[in-house]
């Protein structure tokens, strides 16, 4: 079995490693970086910078913990070295694992030349054509830039030009209030920038629970962030020392820099999809079934290209499932991925995380639910740490007590949501959480309290 994987992001890495362990001859093609451009040039560096910003914010609250006021300064060069060091360590680790497992790594661009034919344009060694029994397309995505915006990498930035930026912006205008946008707002406000956020709808995070979004908006306003709600950016005017963003309602906002965070575009151009008979949508995604198969059964798509949840965790799981399917393991007991039960997190301050059915979604569906909520202010560990912003919310079935979902706003929400995700996936009941003997004092105790 020769398995060719095009794209070495989370989905491609996991598929290549799993298939190799199961005995496949694996060729992994990557044109940019082992680990994936969206992962190593977007996700990982943003979280590294957010970690730095969080420490700065914590230092500013030092008096709450009985310390003299602390005023840390950001060393932009050191921060850049830290981001690059993390990337290099991850690339080295993943490359070593792949080589140890016998995966052949081809540095270059891969494309389909037919249903079973793959062409590899090597970065340095010319062109190669190989036959494949199965192919996984895991080419990821890249930042979407509207036609009215001219990104120059100096004052008008895309997300990949901000890790770190040339300078810490004095006044930053962020366009886009989705997950990426609000993370950048938090990051740069923590690092000392004055920040304005253009919100095209009436709340930040329009796809999230309104109560969750409201908690984040409140924190932003308390930290001096300017919110322009109901405004859609339509143009950018660049001056010598400033940039002005024009909105469709006549308002405008000026800053020293602009950061565009309005989603991503799947990398599907140039893949030779037509030559192999693979269908793609108008948006550029490759539609897949529950095995991640395209309309051509032996050609799979995973990660951002598949149009499913754009989460690295989902991509890793998809890659694992694809490898099992390629190697015939689906003939055994096989549990498909349930995308409705995928946990997600937003690394703002406070952190936000959720999983499963949301309260607002349940009401929209007319579904009966039980909602219980506990504020962080009632948790001893939160008080000890000096950060009691946020809450834990559990959504359950009133008839059976089964946990259907949950939302967490507050410190370490991204870690705590894993407990709720396990409960949702395993169909545990609220009583199972309530009777768990968690550590004291710990933030996790709020989960048990919310489940009572």
Image (spheres, helix red, strand yellow):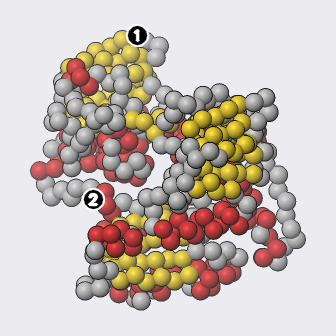
User: Marks 2 and 1: which is nearer the front?
Assistant: 2
Which residue occupies the extreme right position in the image? 68
Instruction: Please report the residue visible at 35 percent of the width from the left and 83 percent of the height from the top.
Output: 370
Residue 254 sits in quarter? top right
Q: Which residue is mark 1?
A: 126
- Please tell me whether mark 2 sits on a helix, a strand or a loop: loop
Q: Is residue 361 visible?
A: yes
Q: What residue is at 88 percent from the left and 71 percent from the top? A: 68
* Image x and y of residue 39, in percent: 49, 42
User: Taking 183 as reference, is 397 above or below it?
Assistant: below
Residue plotted at (16% across, 50% down): 330
Quarter of the image for the N terminus: give it. top left
Could you tell me which residue is drawn at 15 percent across and 58 percent down? Answer: 333
Q: Residues within 10 Å of mark 1 (few under 14, many from 20)?
A: few
Relative placement, left or right, of 149 versus 310 is right
Residue position for label 2: 338
Tell me if residue 441 comes above or below residue 292 in the rendering. below
Say whether disc 2 or disc 1 marks the residue closer to the N-terminus. 1
Q: Nearer the viewer, residue 343 or 210?
A: 210
Quarter of the view holding residue 358: bottom left
């Amino acid at each position: 079995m020769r398995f060719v994987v095009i794209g070495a992001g989370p989905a491609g890495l996991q598929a290549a490693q799993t298939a190799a362990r199961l005995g496949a001859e694996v060729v992994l093609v990557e044109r940019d970086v082992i680990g994936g451009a969206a992962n190593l040039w977007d996700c990982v560096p943003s979280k590294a910078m957010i970690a730095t910003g969080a420490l700065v914010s914590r230092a500013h609250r030092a008096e709450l913990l009985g310390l003299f006021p602390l005023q840390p300064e950001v060393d932009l060069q050191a921060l850049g070295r830290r981001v690059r060091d993390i990337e290099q360590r991850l690339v080295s680790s993943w490359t070593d694992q792949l080589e140890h497992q016998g995966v052949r790594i081809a540095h270059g661009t891969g494309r389909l030349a037919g249903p079973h034919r793959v062409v590899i344009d090597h970065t340095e060694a010319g062109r190669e054509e190989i036959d494949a029994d199965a192919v996984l397309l895991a080419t990821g995505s890249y930042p979407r830039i509207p036609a009215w915006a001219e990104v120059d990498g100096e004052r008008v930035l895309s997300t990949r030009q901000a890790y770190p930026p040339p300078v810490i912006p004095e006044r930053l205008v962020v366009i886009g209030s989705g997950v990426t946008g609000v993370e950048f707002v938090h990051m740069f406000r923590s690092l000392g920038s004055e920040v304005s956020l253009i919100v095209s709808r009436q709340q930040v995070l329009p796809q999230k629970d309104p109560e969750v979004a409201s908690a984040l908006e409140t924190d932003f306003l308390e930290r001096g962030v300017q919110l322009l709600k109901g405004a859609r950016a339509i143009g950018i005017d660049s001056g010598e020392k400033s940039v002005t963003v024009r909105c469709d309602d006549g308002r405008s906002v000026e800053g020293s820099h602009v950061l565009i965070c309005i989603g991503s575009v799947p990398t599907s151009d140039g893949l030779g999809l037509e030559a192999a008979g693979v269908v793609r949508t108008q948006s550029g995604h490759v539609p897949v079934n529950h095995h991640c198969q395209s309309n051509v059964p032996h050609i799979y798509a995973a990660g951002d290209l598949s149009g499913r949840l754009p989460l690295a965790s989902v991509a890793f799981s998809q890659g694992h499932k694809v490898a099992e399917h390629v190697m015939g393991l689906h003939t055994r007991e096989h549990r498909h991925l349930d995308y409705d039960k995928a946990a997600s997190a937003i690394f703002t301050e406070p952190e936000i995380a959720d999983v499963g059915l949301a309260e607002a979604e349940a009401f929209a569906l007319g579904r009966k639910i039980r909602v219980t909520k506990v504020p962080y202010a009632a948790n001893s560990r939160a008080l000890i740490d000096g950060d009691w912003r946020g809450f834990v919310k559990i959504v359950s079935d009133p008839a059976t007590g089964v946990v259907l979902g949950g939302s967490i706003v507050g410190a370490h929400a991204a870690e705590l949501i894993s407990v709720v995700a396990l409960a949702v996936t395993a169909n545990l009941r609220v009583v199972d959480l309530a009777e768990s003997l968690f550590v004291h004092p710990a933030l996790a105790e709020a989960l048990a309290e919310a489940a009572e």
